[in-house]
């Protein structure tokens, strides 16, 4: 509470790939070594786990297994002429003769709001009037979605994968089947890509685990060092505290007498040497 009566709140929440982390992102756990030094023994949850993207990858895998919320898809069938009308027989797509007038639906999910908002866009197919380019142009008109023919294959992508995802539903045109971009085709592509991402994330997590292991080893070494220092200090203190004062004074007096005798002998020797010199 500030002096102006307003409540100041510092948010420590972050959201990555629609996975929310509400822990402390600024502080790592550290132990105090001595009076002034500290040794970090772990990282905060954001840096150690969330930043690897593991939760986002697992969430995407769950969605793809359910057949929903795709962010990209590429048709497995290749066209030779994307400008030919669909009923001309010149598109080069397999089973193009099964195309018929009808529709298919593109469902777009917008994650910028909560709860996420879904919008359905029905794409009409007129085999006598439309070409493959025309169909892609209609899909392009959907907010947050782009479509194009690349090397004869239809590619549909989210303009902002963190915000928009999509699913495709066939109704009566058979277009998705002919283009090779059905629900099953998209699932296979998305899961294959996600498995590759998961492998990369697992490698990164292994690196983090190795880092934690090295931190633990450093703590063990520090503990051993301080144990040794403590033992040495106790031994030194014991020698001081356990000294027999009477015996120490007697030894001191004896050494003092011997020292004085040595000084007297040296003085006499010096006097004789001086007399001989004179």
Image (cartoon, grey):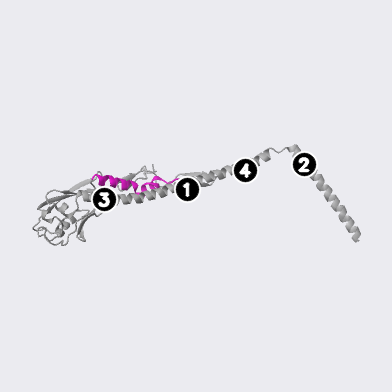
Q: Earlier in the sequence, mark 2 or mark 1?
A: 1
Q: Nearer the viewer, residue 178 or 44?
A: 178
Which residue does the image show at 38% across and 50% down from the upper left? 203
Q: State how far apart marks 2 and 1 are (Cα).
A: 53 Å
- Which residue bears the numbered disc 4? 232
Residue span colored magenta: 42-66
Q: Is residue 82 left or right of residue 164?
A: left
Please tell me the numbered disc located at residue 203.
none
Q: Earlier in the sequence, mark 3 or mark 2?
A: 3
Q: Locate the C terminus by quadrant.
A: bottom right
Residues under numbered marks 3 and 2 in contact, where contact means CB atoms less than 8 Å apart:
no
Which residue does the image show at 65% across and 40% down from the upper left? 237
Residue 50 in the image: x percent, y percent? 36, 47
Residues under numbered marks 2 and 4 in contact, where contact means CB atoms less than 8 Å apart:
no
- Which residue bears the numbered disc 2? 251
Residue 151 in the image: x percent, y percent? 21, 61
């Amino acid at each position: 509470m500030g002096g102006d009566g307003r409540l100041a709140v510092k948010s420590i929440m972050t959201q990555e790939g629609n996975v929310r982390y509400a822990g402390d992102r600024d502080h790592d756990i550290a132990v105090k070594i001595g009076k002034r030094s500290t040794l970090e023994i772990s990282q905060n949850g954001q840096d150690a786990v969330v930043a690897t993207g593991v939760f986002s990858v697992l969430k995407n895998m769950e969605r793809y297994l359910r057949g929903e919320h795709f962010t990209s898809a590429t048709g497995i069938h290749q066209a030779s002429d994307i400008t030919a009308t669909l009923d001309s027989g010149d598109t080069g797509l397999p089973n193009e003769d099964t195309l018929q007038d009808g529709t298919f639906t593109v469902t777009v999910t917008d994650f910028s709001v909560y709860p996420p908002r879904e919008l359905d866009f029905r794409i009409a197919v007129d085999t006598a009037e439309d070409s493959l380019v025309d169909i892609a142009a209609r899909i392009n008109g959907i907010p947050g979605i782009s479509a194009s023919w690349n090397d004869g294959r239809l590619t549909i992508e989210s303009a902002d994968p963190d915000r928009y995802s999509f699913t495709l539903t066939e109704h009566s045109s058979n277009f998705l089947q002919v283009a090779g971009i059905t629900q099953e085709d998209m699932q296979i592509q998305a899961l294959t890509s996600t498995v590759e991402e998961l492998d990369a994330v697992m490698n990164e997590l292994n690196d983090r685990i190795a880092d934690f292991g090295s931190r633990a080893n450093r703590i063990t070494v520090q503990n051993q060092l301080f144990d040794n220092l403590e033992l040495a200090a106790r031994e030194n203190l014991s020698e001081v505290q356990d000294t027999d004062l009477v015996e120490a004074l007697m030894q001191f007096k004896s050494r003092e007498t011997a020292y004085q005798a040595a000084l007297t002998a040296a003085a006499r020797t010096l006097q004789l040497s001086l007399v001989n010199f004179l």
